[in-house]
Image (cartoon, rainbow, N blue to C red):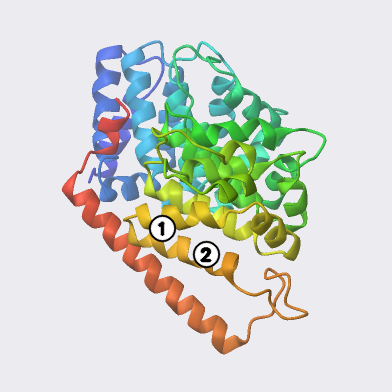
Amino acid sequence: MLSDGEAKELLSFLTLEMRADVKGQATGYILGLTGNRDGCRYLQTKPDFLKALVTLTRDPSIAIVKDCYHALINLSADETLHQPLVKETHLLDILFQNLLDPEYMFADRICTILSNLSRHERTCRDVFSALQEQKIGLDKVVEIFCTEGFNKKASLHYLGPLLSNLTQLPEARQFILDKDRCVIQRLLPYTQYEESTTRRGGVVGTLRNCCFAYTHHEWLLSDAVDILPYLLLPLAGPEELSEEENEGLPVDLQYLPEDKKREDDPDIRKMLLETLMLLTATKVGRQIVKNKNVYPIMREFHKWEKDPHVISACEKLVQVLIGDEPEAGMENLMEVEIPKDVEEKLKELDTKEQEQMEKDKQESEKQSHISYTDLTD
């Protein structure tokens, strides 16, 4: 890494007033540092460099601004940099101001940084607070997300994961589930948004998080929201069901065409199943889901699915759909007090499952590795 003298000299090049060629070499060097973990951890101890990168996102040179955003994407991918980025700089203020500009050409990079920063609860709260303090609010983020072509120079797909991350907070879920705002109804169609897996996954993650608020289950499943078809359609295939099975399904699920395709991303399929599972945690939710004849869709899906983790999630849901009702006092599965030994066993099983999923993911990434910087070019 740099000596103190070298670091001081490099920092002197990272100013708006510096010549563009010198400044460009300096930002290029910093970008290179952020490409590996050691470089990121070094910059964690150098808040002046972080401040300089944020300042240079206002540089007149597009190439320099691009390097700065690439570096900030790489830095924000490292959780240990989250607090220095939000506490030592004015990063969030600048990101939100530029996000609101429909002409801003780096808006997609902004969405990626915000999505990275909001992954973990502590900094997620900082992101949510910055939204409130700047009087932007979650309603504006949803409005931008749902306005096709808001920014002609950016897709803004990564606003989906940002919304999903923000809804790990009860305050954000409360906003999305406000019956007078019709926010969740605006998001539902994006469960089938063909142009972007990122946008679809972000919305499904948002819906899943919102379904942890079990007091809203009956409303979510009612005609006022009608969430069930939006969760089931991506899981339904072209298989021919009996007339009796079709008639019991929601209208949108009946007599699907022969070319009907299922969601192709296994992570999204798993989240959809987990969302359905959450909706069956309450007695009223189970009754509605069972009455809507969900089982035949799940039966055919189980035959088709190949991913072991998705199959496991499907089997858990099927057990609820075909099983007996819990005994008195245990109707709400989210309020049931689990014995400590059973809870420990469940945690152990869940940890093993997560470790296996992470192992499978790492193996997959080894086979088809693309650097994060390449993805954002």
Label disc, if present, on residue 79 of the rendered structure: none
Q: Is residue 123 visible?
A: yes
Q: Position of residue 271 (x, y in %)?
A: 49, 51
Mark 2 and mark 1 residues within 8 Å of each other at the beta carbon? yes
The answer to which of 106 and 334 lies nearer the viewer is: 334
Crowding near the residue tagged with mark 2, few <14, some 14–19, many ≥20 C-alpha atoms within 10 Å: some
Judging by the rendered image, the residue that carries numbered circle 1 is 302
Q: Position of residue 171 (x, y in %)?
A: 72, 47
Q: Choose the circle earlier in sequence order: 2 or 1.
A: 1
Q: Quadrant of residue 184?
A: top right
Q: Position of residue 7 (x, y in %)?
A: 29, 38
The answer to which of 356 and 131 lies nearer the viewer is: 356
Give me the residue at 33% from left, 19% from top.
Answer: 64
The answer to which of 44 and 252 lies nearer the viewer is: 252
- Give, as a three-letter code, the residue at label 2: Val
Q: Assign the C terminus to one quadrant of the image.
A: top left
Give the secondary structure at mark 2. helix
Give me the residue at 44% from left, 13% from top.
Answer: 153
- Give, as a three-letter code, the residue at label 1: His
Residue furthest to the front = 243
Crowding near the residue tagged with mark 1, few <14, some 14–19, many ≥20 C-alpha atoms within 10 Å: some
Give me the residue at 60% from left, 41% from top.
Answer: 229
Judging by the rendered image, the residue that carries numbered circle 2 is 318
